[in-house]
């Protein structure tokens, strides 16, 4: 589908190709890509503000075959940062944390605390909620 050849035949390979297709070939942002891969349920979309509702409805209708319905938790590294994304049902856990200008992502808080016990912020994002850590601000300066 979309010209990709899956040679490893793993879900990780498929998700990688989906992200490549949406970001590189179609020009979607990482947030938009997250709303395709881990799209909100229709009932949830209906409760959002008008702008978000329209955007998420459009994405669901444009890319219905790219919704990943099984359990997953991914960390995507890209030039300029990291994105963490878990499935919309939270079948796989994702924990994020910050200490100063250092970001942490793991499936368990205990793994993060093993590295840094005194964190500034720890949270578990909602299912399908992307967490994006940027290395640079909008002007291209290191954060």
Image (tube, rainbow, N blue to C red):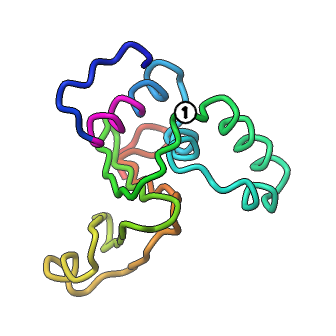
The N terminus: image quadrant:
top left
Question: Which image quadrant for residue 85?
Answer: bottom left
Which of the pair 129/102 is nearer the observer?
Answer: 129
Which of the pair 56/120 is nearer the observer?
Answer: 56
Mark 1 secondary-structure assignment: helix
Q: Residue at x 43, y 77 (%)?
A: 123
Q: Is residue 59 magenta?
A: no
Which of the pair 98/9 is nearer the observer?
Answer: 9
Q: Is residue 17 magenta?
A: yes
Q: Which residue carries the number 1 mark? A: 65
Picture coordinates of residue 33, whole percent (x, y): 52, 39
Q: Residue at x 63, y 55 (%)?
A: 40
Magenta-highlighted residues: 11-18
Which residue is the extreme one toward the bottom?
118
Q: Residue at x 75, y 49 (%)?
A: 52
Which residue is the extreme one toward the left?
114
Specify whether 109 is left or right of 43: left
Please tell me whether the stretch drawn in magenta is mainly helix, strand or loop. helix
Picture coordinates of residue 57, whole percent (x, y): 74, 42
Specify whether 78 is left or right of 137: left
| In the depicted structure, whether residue 32 falls above or below residue 111 | above
Picture coordinates of residue 143, whole percent (x, y): 37, 53
Specify whether 39 is left or right of 139: right
| In the depicted structure, whether residue 71 falls above or below residue 66 | below
């Amino acid at each position: 589908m979309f010209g990709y050849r899956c040679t490893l035949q793993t879900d990780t390979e498929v998700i990688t190709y989906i992200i490549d297709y949406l970001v590189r070939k179609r020009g979607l942002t990482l947030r938009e890509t997250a709303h395709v891969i881990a799209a909100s349920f229709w009932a949830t979309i209906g409760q959002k503000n008008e702008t978000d509702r329209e955007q998420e409805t459009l994405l669901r209708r444009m890319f219905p075959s790219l919704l990943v319905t099984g359990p997953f938790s991914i960390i995507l590294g890209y030039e300029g940062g990291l994105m963490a994304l878990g499935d919309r049902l939270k079948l796989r856990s994702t924990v994020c944390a910050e200490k100063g200008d250092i970001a942490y992502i793991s499936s368990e808080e205990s793994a993060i605390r093993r590295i840094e016990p005194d964190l500034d912020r720890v949270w578990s994002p909602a299912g399908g909620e992307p967490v994006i850590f940027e290395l640079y601000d909008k002007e291209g300066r290191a954060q």
